[in-house]
Amino acid sequence: MINSKLVEQLAEQGHRMTGALEASLEVITDNNGVSGVGEKYGIFVNLGVKAEQIKHPYARARIDGLTRFAQIRMGVDEKAGRSIAFAIATAHARDGMPTQGSYRYSNNGKRTDSIDDAIELSEPEIIDILFNEFTSVIDVHTNVTGR
């Protein structure tokens, strides 16, 4: 439930490109509660990154990743992708992430907080599940104890 809402929120915010993040998402429930795992970069997609936290905006690995991003997202060749990658890195160094320009990919005007939004949207279903479980426990207790 939360997982499907999170996938919806990521798509609404314009973060769907290859599907790798969505495919990596897993919700784990145990006696201690609920937690989620996924691609490491998902936390940066969710929280954003302040400009001052980007220490090496032009690092080779970063430029290579941004080049691939530009090629996939914009359908450009490697040379154009590399040029776009440096422009994006400059914007990241100046503005952080998300950049103002990235909002054009969003359908709901947001680029961060997809996890919080998914949990909030799942709240009514979560409450129903908890209520039903609580009611079941009371029913069992009543049947066993007679009170």
Image (cartoon, grey):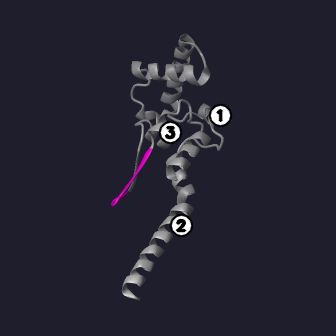
The foreground one among 47 and 100 is 47
> Which segment is the magenta one?
26-33
Give x and y (percent) for residue 140.
41, 78
Q: CA distance from mark 1 to mark 3?
A: 21 Å
Evaluate whether residue 113 shows in this view: no
Q: Residue under label 2, please give it.
A: 128
For the point 50% across and 29% down, the residue is: 92
Give x and y (percent) for residue 47.
47, 43
Report the side of 104 relative to 97 (left or right): right
Q: Residue under label 1, please give it.
A: 104
Q: Residue under label 3, please give it.
A: 22
Report the side of 79 relative to 31 (left or right): right
Q: Residues within 10 Å of mark 1 (few under 14, many from 20)?
A: few
Instruction: Look at label 2 and name its amino acid.
Output: Asp
For this orientation, the residue located farthest to the front is: 143
Q: CA distance from mark 2 to mark 1?
A: 36 Å
Give x and y (percent) for residue 116.
51, 52
Circle 1: element type:
helix
